[in-house]
Amino acid sequence: MLSKNGSGRKSLGASIVLFILLLLAPAVIPKFYTYILAVIFVTALLAMSLNLVVGHGGLFQFHHAVFYGVGAYTAGLILAKTSWPWWIGFIAGPFAAALTGFLIGLFCVRLNRLYFGMLQISLGSLIWAIAFRWYGLTGGDDGVHGIPMPEFISSLNSSYYFVLVVLGICLILMYLILKSPFGMTLQAIRDNPERCAAVGINVRRHQLMGIVVATFFAGIAGVLFIAVEGSIFPDLLFWVLSLEVFIMCLLGGWFTFSGPILGAAVIVSLRTFVGTYTEYWTLILGVILILLIFFLPEGIMGYNYLAKFRSWSKRMSANSLE
């Protein structure tokens, strides 16, 4: 127990130090890197929201980006096309995403595994098609640009701090949810849904609740996207983005809490920096994924490096004694 408490205090201390460093970062790094960090924060929140139902819930959530797009479009259209206060759009985005998740989830939770994912891709693609074709409302494939932002996030630095603070709050909430009885039940359903049903747990209801929670946080990420970019476009709802976010969870470690953050940082950095030199940056990502599947199947942060090191040390000690 003492070791666990000590480890928890170290993790908390490291998180606080990292948060302080990120607060100070805009004062010492170029604006371009400040922007990239803000994009990583937004993408990390989206990946974390997906991991709530994929890594911790065991659901095949193959089209999670559609809820991200719904949150962004709801907030963006309210800000761009109405005279309502900004906070209405910022609040409406996550709730619209959660409502969409609830409606799609009602159909999907009736199916298992791959069929769940395929139906979600189909229903999500319908929403993408509406955004892509409804020029009068959504701007079609052109999207909506130059969305007016409230005064307090009108600059790059201010939007960076806003995104960082909201991300911190969301991470705390997600951690508390996963440690709650609901979160523990969701993970038990992931491991053995038949046994959970046998002891009286309503599996479908918990899975649907997990989808609603995850899509709510995806909607928050969508709102943060327009706070950084000031625009919306149909690619936010496209299945390719869903696949990219899914890879972030696999890369960082989908059975860990903070693994998707690392995965988001790696992929956004690859896309930004390697993509400036070659358009085939996805080839490098493919090589990384192949190596990951063979050597780190549980992701970078899912691998127990300490246990492997201890095992290696014991073998070396045994060999030396011989």
Image (tube, rainbow, N blue to C red):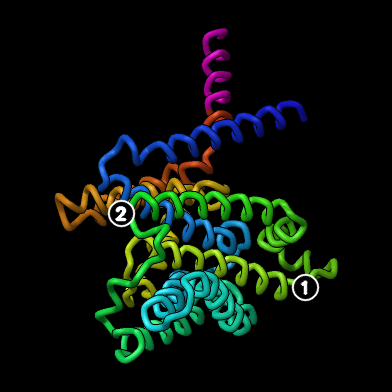
Q: CA distance from mark 1 to mark 2?
A: 39 Å
Residue 293 showing in the rendered view: no
| Dot 2 amino acid type | Gly
Location of the N terminus by quadrant is top right
Residue 88 position in % (x across, y down): 52, 74
Judge left or right: residue 84 versus residue 186. Answer: left
Q: Can you tell which quarter of the image residue 187 is in?
A: bottom right
Question: Is 274 situated left or right of 265 in this image?
Answer: left
- Residue wearing tag 2: 286
Q: Position of residue 78 (x, y in %)?
A: 43, 79
* Disc 1 crowd, CA 10 A, few/some/many (<14, 14-19, 20+): few
Q: Is residue 216 above or below residue 234?
A: above
Q: Tag 2, which secondary structure?
A: helix
What residue lies at 35% left-to-right and 59% top-to-bottom?
Answer: 154
Task: Give the mark toward the camera: 1 or 2.
Answer: 1
The part of the chain drawn in magenta is 309-322
Q: Residues within 10 Å of mark 2 (few under 14, many from 20)?
A: few
Q: Which residue is at a point 36% across and 75% down the rendered structure image?
A: 238
Task: Name above or below for residue 143 compared with residue 251.
Answer: below
The residue where tag 1 is placed is 202
> Are dots 1 and 2 in contact, CB under 8 Å?
no
Quadrant of the rendered image containing residue 318: top right
Q: Can residue 143 be found in the magenta stretch?
A: no
SS at circle 1: loop
Q: Residue placed at 61% from the left, 75% from the top?
A: 112
| Residue at position x 47%, y 46% in the image | 299
- As drawn, the label of residue 57 is none
Percent coordinates x, y for residue 292 in the rendering? 40, 47
Q: In this orientation, which residue lies closer to the viewer: 318 or 146?
A: 146
The correct choice, above or below, for 316 with respect to 256 in the image is above
